Amino acid sequence: MIQPPDGQAPASAVGAVIVRNFEESDRDAVIRLWKDCGLVVPWNDPARDIGRKLAFQKDLFLVAVENGVPIGTVMAGYEGHRGWINYLAVASDRRKKGLGRRLMDEAEKRLRALGCPKISLQIRKTNAEVAGFYGKLGFAVDDVLSMGKRLENDSPARPK
Protein backbone atom coordinates (compact mmCIF):
# COMPACT_ATOMS: atom_id res chain seq x y z
CA MET A 1 0.00 0.00 0.00
CA ILE A 2 1.26 3.45 -0.91
CA GLN A 3 0.83 6.07 1.79
CA PRO A 4 -1.63 8.76 0.67
CA PRO A 5 -0.55 12.42 0.53
CA ASP A 6 -2.31 14.95 2.77
CA GLY A 7 -4.94 12.64 4.25
CA GLN A 8 -6.27 11.23 0.97
CA ALA A 9 -7.64 7.71 0.82
CA PRO A 10 -4.90 5.08 0.32
CA ALA A 11 -3.70 4.28 -3.19
CA SER A 12 -2.52 0.90 -4.35
CA ALA A 13 0.12 0.02 -6.89
CA VAL A 14 0.35 -2.69 -9.54
CA GLY A 15 3.86 -2.65 -10.95
CA ALA A 16 4.49 0.90 -12.16
CA VAL A 17 0.75 1.64 -12.21
CA ILE A 18 -0.71 3.46 -9.22
CA VAL A 19 -4.44 3.38 -8.43
CA ARG A 20 -5.43 6.49 -6.50
CA ASN A 21 -8.21 9.04 -6.04
CA PHE A 22 -9.00 11.35 -8.96
CA GLU A 23 -7.15 14.67 -8.83
CA GLU A 24 -8.24 17.83 -10.63
CA SER A 25 -5.09 17.72 -12.76
CA ASP A 26 -6.40 14.42 -14.23
CA ARG A 27 -9.56 15.99 -15.67
CA ASP A 28 -8.60 16.56 -19.33
CA ALA A 29 -6.77 13.23 -19.68
CA VAL A 30 -9.64 11.33 -18.05
CA ILE A 31 -12.18 12.89 -20.41
CA ARG A 32 -9.95 11.98 -23.39
CA LEU A 33 -9.68 8.41 -22.05
CA TRP A 34 -13.46 8.15 -21.69
CA LYS A 35 -13.94 9.42 -25.24
CA ASP A 36 -11.31 6.98 -26.57
CA CYS A 37 -13.14 4.15 -24.77
CA GLY A 38 -16.52 5.15 -26.24
CA LEU A 39 -18.03 6.01 -22.85
CA VAL A 40 -19.06 9.56 -23.73
CA VAL A 41 -22.44 10.03 -25.36
CA PRO A 42 -24.07 13.32 -26.37
CA TRP A 43 -26.55 13.33 -23.48
CA ASN A 44 -23.83 12.96 -20.80
CA ASP A 45 -21.33 15.79 -20.37
CA PRO A 46 -18.20 14.15 -18.91
CA ALA A 47 -16.97 17.39 -17.32
CA ARG A 48 -20.30 17.80 -15.54
CA ASP A 49 -20.24 14.14 -14.48
CA ILE A 50 -16.80 14.68 -12.94
CA GLY A 51 -18.02 17.79 -11.12
CA ARG A 52 -21.04 15.93 -9.80
CA LYS A 53 -18.89 13.06 -8.57
CA LEU A 54 -16.41 15.38 -6.85
CA ALA A 55 -19.35 16.88 -4.93
CA PHE A 56 -20.39 13.46 -3.59
CA GLN A 57 -18.21 10.51 -2.51
CA LYS A 58 -15.13 11.74 -4.35
CA ASP A 59 -13.11 8.98 -2.66
CA LEU A 60 -14.97 6.50 -4.88
CA PHE A 61 -13.60 8.07 -8.08
CA LEU A 62 -10.41 6.16 -8.86
CA VAL A 63 -7.74 6.71 -11.50
CA ALA A 64 -4.99 4.33 -12.58
CA VAL A 65 -1.90 6.35 -13.41
CA GLU A 66 1.34 5.34 -15.08
CA ASN A 67 4.17 7.87 -15.22
CA GLY A 68 1.70 10.59 -14.28
CA VAL A 69 -0.71 9.73 -17.12
CA PRO A 70 -4.23 8.41 -16.39
CA ILE A 71 -4.66 5.06 -18.16
CA GLY A 72 -7.75 3.80 -16.35
CA THR A 73 -10.71 4.94 -14.26
CA VAL A 74 -13.65 3.69 -12.28
CA MET A 75 -16.36 5.78 -10.66
CA ALA A 76 -18.30 4.05 -7.89
CA GLY A 77 -21.15 5.16 -5.68
CA TYR A 78 -23.18 3.90 -2.73
CA GLU A 79 -26.52 5.19 -1.49
CA GLY A 80 -27.12 2.77 1.36
CA HIS A 81 -28.88 0.02 -0.61
CA ARG A 82 -26.42 -0.94 -3.34
CA GLY A 83 -23.23 0.21 -4.94
CA TRP A 84 -22.96 1.29 -8.55
CA ILE A 85 -20.12 1.22 -11.04
CA ASN A 86 -19.73 3.81 -13.79
CA TYR A 87 -17.00 4.94 -16.15
CA LEU A 88 -14.80 1.86 -15.93
CA ALA A 89 -12.23 2.64 -18.60
CA VAL A 90 -8.84 1.22 -19.52
CA ALA A 91 -6.66 2.63 -22.28
CA SER A 92 -6.79 0.36 -25.32
CA ASP A 93 -3.07 -0.49 -25.17
CA ARG A 94 -3.36 -1.48 -21.48
CA ARG A 95 -6.31 -3.87 -21.77
CA LYS A 96 -6.16 -7.59 -20.96
CA LYS A 97 -3.33 -6.99 -18.48
CA GLY A 98 -5.36 -7.00 -15.26
CA LEU A 99 -5.85 -3.26 -14.88
CA GLY A 100 -9.63 -3.31 -15.23
CA ARG A 101 -9.78 -6.07 -12.62
CA ARG A 102 -7.48 -4.07 -10.32
CA LEU A 103 -9.69 -0.98 -10.60
CA MET A 104 -12.78 -3.05 -9.89
CA ASP A 105 -11.10 -4.78 -6.92
CA GLU A 106 -10.22 -1.40 -5.39
CA ALA A 107 -13.73 -0.03 -5.98
CA GLU A 108 -15.23 -3.18 -4.42
CA LYS A 109 -12.88 -2.92 -1.44
CA ARG A 110 -13.96 0.66 -0.81
CA LEU A 111 -17.64 -0.17 -1.23
CA ARG A 112 -17.32 -3.11 1.21
CA ALA A 113 -15.72 -0.77 3.74
CA LEU A 114 -18.90 1.35 3.56
CA GLY A 115 -21.06 -1.73 4.28
CA CYS A 116 -22.29 -2.11 0.69
CA PRO A 117 -24.03 -5.51 0.25
CA LYS A 118 -24.35 -5.55 -3.56
CA ILE A 119 -22.85 -3.84 -6.59
CA SER A 120 -24.86 -3.12 -9.73
CA LEU A 121 -23.83 -1.75 -13.08
CA GLN A 122 -25.36 -1.08 -16.44
CA ILE A 123 -23.86 -1.80 -19.83
CA ARG A 124 -25.14 -0.04 -22.92
CA LYS A 125 -26.43 -2.52 -25.47
CA THR A 126 -23.94 -1.04 -27.94
CA ASN A 127 -21.10 -2.03 -25.58
CA ALA A 128 -22.19 -5.61 -24.90
CA GLU A 129 -18.72 -7.15 -25.37
CA VAL A 130 -17.73 -5.98 -21.88
CA ALA A 131 -20.32 -8.34 -20.38
CA GLY A 132 -17.75 -11.16 -20.58
CA PHE A 133 -15.26 -9.10 -18.59
CA TYR A 134 -17.78 -8.43 -15.84
CA GLY A 135 -18.89 -12.08 -15.89
CA LYS A 136 -15.31 -13.14 -15.09
CA LEU A 137 -15.46 -10.82 -12.07
CA GLY A 138 -18.58 -12.57 -10.76
CA PHE A 139 -21.27 -10.28 -12.12
CA ALA A 140 -24.39 -11.87 -13.57
CA VAL A 141 -27.41 -10.54 -15.43
CA ASP A 142 -30.14 -9.63 -12.93
CA ASP A 143 -33.75 -10.30 -13.80
CA VAL A 144 -34.67 -6.62 -13.77
CA LEU A 145 -35.77 -3.94 -16.17
CA SER A 146 -33.54 -0.89 -16.06
CA MET A 147 -35.45 2.37 -16.20
CA GLY A 148 -34.31 5.95 -16.03
CA LYS A 149 -35.62 9.47 -15.94
CA ARG A 150 -33.44 12.37 -17.00
CA LEU A 151 -33.55 15.24 -14.50
CA GLU A 152 -30.97 17.34 -16.33
CA ASN A 153 -30.16 17.52 -20.00
CA ASP A 154 -26.40 17.92 -20.47
CA SER A 155 -26.60 18.04 -24.24
CA PRO A 156 -27.39 21.37 -25.86
CA ALA A 157 -28.44 19.44 -28.99
CA ARG A 158 -31.28 17.53 -27.28
CA PRO A 159 -34.53 19.25 -26.34
CA LYS A 160 -35.60 19.05 -22.69
Image: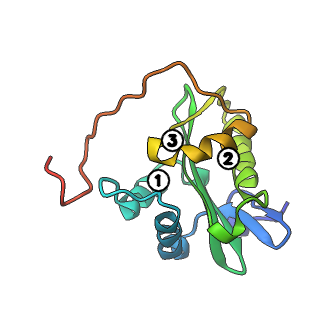
Q: Position of residue 4 (x, y in %)?
A: 74, 65
93 left or right of 121 in image: right
With respect to residue 14, does 143 lie above or below?
above
Quadrant occupied by the N terminus: bottom right
Residue 107: assigned label: 2
Of 115 and 67, the residue lying toward us: 67
Q: How far is the residue under mark 3 from the one under mark 1? A: 19 Å
The quadrant holding residue 9 is bottom right
Q: Position of residue 52 (x, y in %)?
A: 41, 54
Amino acid at the residue labelled 3: Ile
Callout 1 crowding tier (Cα within 10 Å): few <14, some 14–19, many ≥20? some
Residue at the disc numbered 3 = 123
Amino acid at the residue labelled 2: Ala
The quadrant holding residue 136 is top right
Q: How is the image coloured?
A: rainbow
Amino acid at the residue labelled 1: Lys
Callout 3 crowding tier (Cα within 10 Å): few <14, some 14–19, many ≥20? few
One can see residue 7 in this view: no
Q: How far is the residue under mark 2 from the one under mark 3? A: 17 Å
With respect to residue 84, does 16 lie above or below?
below
| N-term mark: 3 or 1 | 1
| N-term mark: 1 or 2 | 1
Give the secondary structure at mark 2: helix
Q: Residue at x 54, y 54 (%)?
A: 58
Q: Residue at x 30, y 53 (%)?
A: 43
Residue 53: assigned label: 1
One can see residue 114 in this view: yes
Give the secondary structure at mark 3: loop
